[in-house]
Amino acid sequence: MVRSFFIHTFGCQMNVQDSEKMAALLADMGYKCADDPRRADLIIVNTCAIREKAEQKALSLLGRFQYLKKRNHRLIVGVSGCFAQKLGYSFLERMPHLDFVLGTQNIHKLPDVIAEVQENKSKVVKTELYDTLPAVRNVACPVDGKVTAFVTIMQGCNNFCTFCVVPYLRGREMSRPWRDIVDEVRFLVKHGVKEVTLLGQNVNSYGSDLGERETFVGLLKRICEVEGLERLRFTTSHPKDLSAELINCFGKLHPLCEHIHLPVQSGSNRILERMNRKYTREDYLDKVNRLRDVCPEIAISSDVIVGFPGETEKDFELTLDLMEKIKFDNLFSFKYSRREGTAAASLDDQVPEEAKSRRLSMLQKLQDSHTMERNKAWEGRVVEVLVEGTSKNDPKEVTGRTRQNKIVNFPGDAQLRGKLLNVRITEAFLHSLRGEII
């Protein structure tokens, strides 16, 4: 009998890639992917612990799977990701129906964990942190027809921003050897991938731990030489490590797309200092200006946290002022979420929930106007679009992205997948563009 698995993923792109790696390991074990957890023999919830809301969603979903476990005693239910790393053994106490807990650096042990659960009927917890990167060595073959892929180049973080749990749950920065990364990119391109996104908590500090003179810029140049690679992206960048050399890569390395995600978090120097971000608003504005000087077509997206402890109305207004000066193409904005174990969690001057909600609403309304303005500027222009597949909303249309990472929908069929097409933008919306092939 063919066994089946179901994986639900919360959180960032790194979690998405971790789920893809687990799926590849399960496929090697003879498992098939199920589109419904009710039809699965194995369920994994890949969690995120960046914000409390993500943790609560994961707990709620895992709670619902308890009823499936009661109906099918052979069903295996496991949890992975940052929340699993955070709770460890206590996850089994909170959720007795769980069979295993798999931490952030133990993806490679999934086959052994499943075997132990099946053979010994025991519960397993693997949350060790390592001095090497065994979990990222497993290369996931792209799903048939998929033309984009993620490649992890490093794991962990050394920045210790006062609001962030990543250094505690993903460990310190560790970079992969550049040859392994380039080989993985070649493998993906050989299997039909046209666009690769490099992943890391802070990609532009890549190589600082390798003991050899390898930099992120050097890695980009090596990857851009891979024959058949059409597009290259990376995320996430820390503003303090955005060097002049890296800025100058935009517009010069052809596969490198004209888009950067550069989290600012706040427009107030006082709050940036409390966050331990190690740059000022002036530094950030200068780097944005240099990016646009080097590459006028570049799209810039960012992250902002509202309601960080001690944030006053004046601090918040400085964030809105920064947004007005830059006019981001897109912005991911969140209310500050108190994370146990971080430096900010112990601060006394927590901002009331009402103030957080009000500020977030104001900020998002302003960003919507900026996003619409930036999108409208593309109307009437011809852009290059990489077709990713058929539109979910209309089978007679296809969807893809511009080099600036903007979604474009236009008439077409599945045979266009993977093609780079010139498309004229006919109409702009808040979350996408509409176009026609020329």
Image: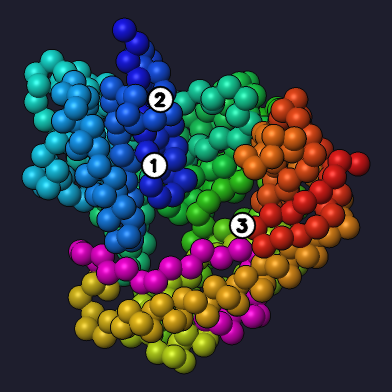
Instruction: Specify the amino acid type for callout 1.
Output: Thr
Marks 1 and 3: CB-CB under 8 Å? no
Instruction: Specify the amino acid type for callout 2.
Output: Ala
Q: Nearer the viewer, residue 382 or 187?
A: 382
Residue 174: in sight, yes or no?
yes
**Mark 2 vs mark 1, CA separation in Å:** 14 Å
Q: Residue at x 53, y 51 (%)?
A: 235
Q: Is residue 341 left or right of residue 396?
A: left
Q: Nearer the viewer, residue 217 or 269?
A: 269
Q: Earlier in the sequence, mark 3 or mark 2?
A: 2
Q: Secondary structure at mark 2?
A: loop
Q: Secondary structure at mark 3?
A: strand
Marks 2 and 1: which is nearer the front?
A: 2
Kindly identify which residue carries mark 3.
Answer: 260
Q: Residues within 10 Å of mark 1 (few under 14, many from 20)?
A: many
Q: Secondary structure at mark 1?
A: strand
Marks 3 and 2: which is nearer the front?
A: 2
| Residue 404 part of the magenta-drawn span | no
Q: Earlier in the sequence, mark 2 or mark 1?
A: 1
Q: Residues within 10 Å of mark 2 (few under 14, many from 20)?
A: some
Residue 210, horizontal then vertical, whole percent? 41, 42
Q: Nearer the viewer, residue 240 or 67?
A: 67
Query: Given the current orientation, which residue lies at the most extreme right position?
Result: 438
Residue 413, horizontal then vertical, whole percent? 76, 30
**Mark 3 vs mark 2, CA separation in Å:** 35 Å
Kindly identify which residue carries mark 1.
Answer: 9
- Residue 143 drawn above or below residue 95: above
Q: Is residue 56 left or right of residue 384?
A: left
Magenta segment: 319-342
